[in-house]
Amino acid sequence: MVNSDAKPVFGQPAAAGPGQPRLRPVNRSQWIMLNIDVDRLIPEDHPARAIWDLVGRLDLSLFYAKVKAVEGHAGQPAFDPRLMISIWVYGISRGISSARELSESCEWEPGLQWLCAMGSVNYHSLSTFRAAHGEALKKLFIDLLGVLSAEGLVEMERVAVDGTKIRAHASDGSFRKGEKLDEHLQTAAAHLEALEQEPEETLSRAQQAARERSRRERQQRVTAAQQELNQLRQQRRGAKEKAQVQVSTTEAEARIMKQPGGGFAPSYNVQLATDEKAKIIVAAVVSTSGTDTRLLAEVVDQVRANSGAAPDQVLVDGGYVSADNLEKLQERGAELIGPVADMQGAVNKQARQRGVGEGYLPQAFRYDSQTNTYQCPEGKVLIQIKQRERQGGRIEHEYRAKKSDCDACPHKQECCRKATTCGRTVVRSEPTPAVKTFREKMQTEPYKELYRKRSEIAEFPNAWLKEKFGFRRFRLSGLAKAGLEGLWAVITYNAQQWTRLVWLQGPRPAAA
């Protein structure tokens, strides 16, 4: 019976009722035998089932051709390439890019447990498989494009090309330049020579093999860094420029590139070509070039090699627009669609940086086409002194006033205060016929509407790769392996688009 006269006291806990609460114990020090229906580990619409189904539709003959273990001969059975591909595609789709982490996840993650049928795959086999099938992986990508095309997801009418910088495996501190780089390479070479002279009688076979592998890998890195250094120095002109060459001592092919969010870091330039219909990636090129302009033709050629035809139209941003690219795409039967650069705005910005006043900007100078001269706001004449072709498809005509006219002008400080050895200079930029036609075309409303689609098409896969896959840094070193790693990510992306647009929308085979 509860005493109704009892009053609670502030700060004093209430009295416990009769008896202690009975709770379920948590005992982790026990063994439990479970009966598991492997096929019911995941639901019918789980992505692991879609990946297994999709990989089974592709031609894996090049992967199977590398399997050394055959029936009737000695040797340990190999892991099924269909399984290895499915594990990697599923792992990358979950943001797992480490072979060790992927191997550990096979022990507990339901999708990987289902793929492996409750078995396990060691991380060394996963790591080796990822980097050992270059040509087979390229064919797998093309076969997947064939499946997507058969489903109506690829049309090749309009393709958007965009580039993104992905950080290299090399660290910032591995880069050396000038004399420091030469000293480092000499020290590394001396260290290798010392290792070769050390006695190996006291070492075990495993230690000898490890030392030999370490020696071989270090020798390869030193040789690659030296070759890359010599090649880059040949491309530079002055002695000062040659001394500024930077090369990574661990990953010679990596380059210091400007990052989208600011700053600089060792990176590779990943170019993606995306089809408009379902935003399927139809080509991927990994390059050491820090600029996008020179890579456009290579990307379009890769699109043709993968799909058998060049796209009708190619959407790009301003970094790709040049007279050279206009000509190259015309030769390939593709039409370039991109923005028209504001040349006048750039010229005015440079003039203001030189201290030119608003009343003496280039547009304040009047051009006379009959005499091919300019007249400044003070009435002085500027005559043509030079003509040159510039990158980007334009011809520049340079006009200059007499030094005596500018020295005697009361507005010299507002117009050309930094011109100490000559008079005021004005440059008239004239586009080549191809660029002129391109600019006129892009001023029309239909082409403006086409260009507005570029960001939607091009930036969708970039965001997917970086945000969903965490594809911001390469795990593998070197341009060739980085290209394979990029291809794995692109194949995974396309597989996910097939899953959400085809597999999840139609009937699926029932579980066994």
Image (cartoon, helix red, strand yellow):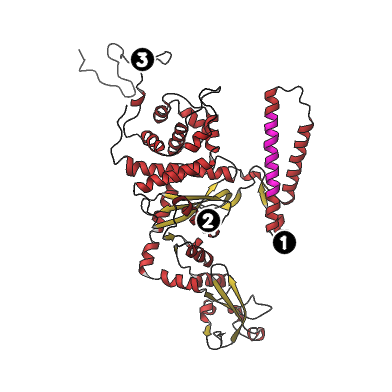
What's the magenta bit mostly, secondary-structure-wise? Answer: helix
Please, what secondary structure does the residue beneath circle 3 have?
loop
Q: Give the range drawn in magenta.
A: 210-227
Which residue type does callout 3 highlight? Pro
Rendered location of residue 305, percent (x, y):
48, 52
Q: Which of marks 1 and 2 is in front?
A: 2
What residue did someone put label 3 on? 25
Query: Taking 27 as reference, is 184 left or right?
Result: right
In three-dimensional space, the C-alpha distance between marks 1 and 2, rounded to whole angstroms, equals 30 Å
Q: Does the magenta stretch include residue 224?
A: yes
Q: Point out the image quarter for the C terminus.
A: top left
Residue 103 visible to the viewer: yes
Could you tell me if the residues under marks 1 and 2 are in contact, i.e. CB atoms within 8 Å? no
Q: Is residue 250 magenta?
A: no
Crowding near pointer 1: few (<14 within 10 Å), some, many (20+)? few
Rendered location of residue 28, percent (x, y):
42, 16
Rendered location of residue 303, percent (x, y):
47, 53
Q: Identify the residue shown where x is 76% and y is 22%.
A: 202
What residue did someone put label 1 on? 238
Q: Residue 298 carries which label?
A: 2
